Image: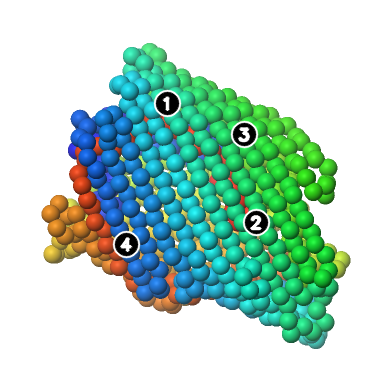
Amino acid sequence: MRKISASKNNSENKSSVGSVSGLAKAEQPQILPNHCITEPGAKYDAEGIGAIINIVMIDNPAVKGVMGTASMSGDTNGRMAQSLWATTQIDKVAVSLNGGFVNLNERCMTIDSDDSNHYIELGNVFNSKSMRKSHGYMSYFGGEASYELDSLNLFTAEFNGFIYDIKSLVGSSASMLDRTGKQIYSYTQSSYPGDDRGKFFSLDGNLNYQHSTRRPGEIIGVGYLVSTTHSNDDEGQQYSELSNFPLPYTKALSNTKTDFIEHTFQFDYTRPFGRIHTVEVGSKYILRNNSSKGIRDYVDYRIDNTDFSHITNIGALYAQYSANVKMWSFRAGVRYEYSNLKAKFHDGSADDFSSDFNDIVPSAGISWRASMASNFSLNYSSRINRPGITYLNPAVSISPTTLSYGNPDLSSVRNNAMKFTYMLIKQKVVFNATAGFDWADNGIAAVNYVDNNGFIRSTFDNVGQVRQLSLSSFIQWSPGSKTRLMLNASVSHDSYKQNGMNLKRWKKSIYANLTQKLPWNISGELMVMHMDMGASGVYSYTEVPLKYSLMVNATLRRSFLKEDRLTVSLNCLAPIGDSGMKINTHIVNGGYTGLSSIYQHNVRMLKLSVAYRFGSLNTSVKKTAKTIENNDMIGGKSANSSGSGVGM
């Protein structure tokens, strides 16, 4: 049987060795004594990674063969999905491949929007209603391979890709009223046929080499990562039924192409010495290129072209010392980062510029193992986040009421976090509680204001001040071999300040999961979730009305044939309450206030899934102790992505 060993910083936790079959079956997870999810330390702190578990595979003798799973599902909203996973081993090379395809139709992608904004200074009121219907597909694929030259040398490779192609039709009506209720203008808007489409492609690949010396725990690692995305978005709007229409055109067509490519080189060295000490050092170099080209044709009025690229070079060095003294563990580390940012306006709309940044990012942690089952830890971390193309792109988007654009002069964000964690792991109960405080003083925040012409202008700037106090808990209880109950709850008080405005809100979420083995070899699962979304900046907060705030998902599952090779699942999402989902955004600060509501149709569904496991192979692809992770970028790799200005 395949074995796993969970470790931190490449130091194996002998007590946490278990069966991979337990991980493969979500309804029967195995969590073993003294297993802790720990803070990442100096190597990762600056990159926005909150926690890391190192999983090292331990092989039994390899058996050549092929094993895989083919699955298919369909639901009452017309979605069909297919997936395939397969793994094989040839001599010392293990290979695993996977892929899947999902079709998306209008029944499951229909959204209504209802907006009402009050302009504080002018007293005007803008009302609009719209419906968006979309269809298309998405697909994913990936693979990984490992080659173990001998017991001391391991080579690995991995790639992952994602594709989608979505077409939409949008129809809306809008009007602007003055403070007395008299209409100023009105219009209807619709998609221009064939010109509302978004296409996206991403591909990541990495190569890793790990050399273990004869000294236990001493490891040298070298890695390379390439990550790339491409998006191509077409939009077309035409306006009709016009009354005092405020724009000098009635049709607008646009095309925006964004490209992202990133190369990363990494070196890591871990050296234990004495019986209690470990030193880790390493380096990383990232070359990142974001670019955007766009054309916007305001038919019979003017044509705007944009051609912009943003290049980031990052060099980093880190060092970390850790020690284990009886029941105590200590960790202290520091990371130095140099980054050079270059903005190039190939269209001549502005002067090119560049800037340099030097950041020193400390981290520290202490933990106390009170018993074989319980552990207390206190950790401080500091992270650097950098803006992506969503925030940087200077291309201007215009509607009858708004004018929005990115800010290529944005700088990186420093986030700080303190976390106190308690963990208890017993045979039938697992409990974790974390209290945290996160803060940032130069967060990337949305900046909105109403100009002299009544347009709402939207961009971004490093003006956000964030304070977040949080408490989260996790409990898993297995009263018997047939029952498992899991509860995950969190609450936070978020405070946002910028430019003399502030907003404070509570954010809450509760997730409960009950798994039960039933007669006739049936397993059942019931999931219940409630979420209060809170605020993400000074201008607005988001809530789910009580009627829609409880999400229920129920599943029945049974396996058939020899060795349970055929599994059939019946899943029902949102069996009670409304069949859709509504989210309200309350705008409370800035040059206007109001309410924006979106309603997604046909969330309720009944889904049938069938999966067949074929072949037999008692091995899997090996993993190196450390791989490259770049999570420092917020605002996405493409124009369709989004991110948090806090970067947590």
Residue name at image x 23 percent, y 52 percent: 613
Q: Which residue is mark 4?
A: 72
Q: Which residue is mark 3?
A: 287
Find residue 190 and report its image quarter.
Answer: bottom right
Name which of mark 1 and mark 3 comes first in the sequence: 1
Residue 537: image tag: 2
Could you say which is closer to the camera, residue 121 or residue 57? 57
Instruction: Give the color scheme: rainbow, by chain, secondary structure or one colour.
Output: rainbow
Determine whether, in the image, residue 226 is placed left or right of residue 566.
right
- The CA span between labels 1 and 2 is 43 Å
Estimate how packed mark 1 is, as few (under 14), some (14 to 19) or many (20 or more) residues with alpha carbons within 10 Å. many
Name which of mark 1 and mark 2 comes first in the sequence: 1
Residue 332, image x, y percentages: 51, 25
Residue 189: image tag: none
Given this view, does label 1 or label 2 mark the residue nearer the observer? Answer: 1
- The CA span between labels 4 and 3 is 40 Å
Residue 161, image x, y percentages: 47, 48
Given this view, does label 4 or label 2 mark the residue nearer the observer? Answer: 4
Given this view, does label 2 or label 3 mark the residue nearer the observer? Answer: 3
- The CA span between labels 2 and 3 is 31 Å
Q: Which residue is mark 1?
A: 209
Residue 68, image x, y percentages: 27, 48
Tag 4 and tag 1, C-beta contact below 8 Å: no
- Figure quadrant of the N terminus: top left
Q: Quick check: can you spot residue 434?
A: yes
Q: Is residue 278 above or below residue 513?
A: above
Find residue 62 and report its image quarter.
Answer: top left
Residue type beneath disc 4: Met
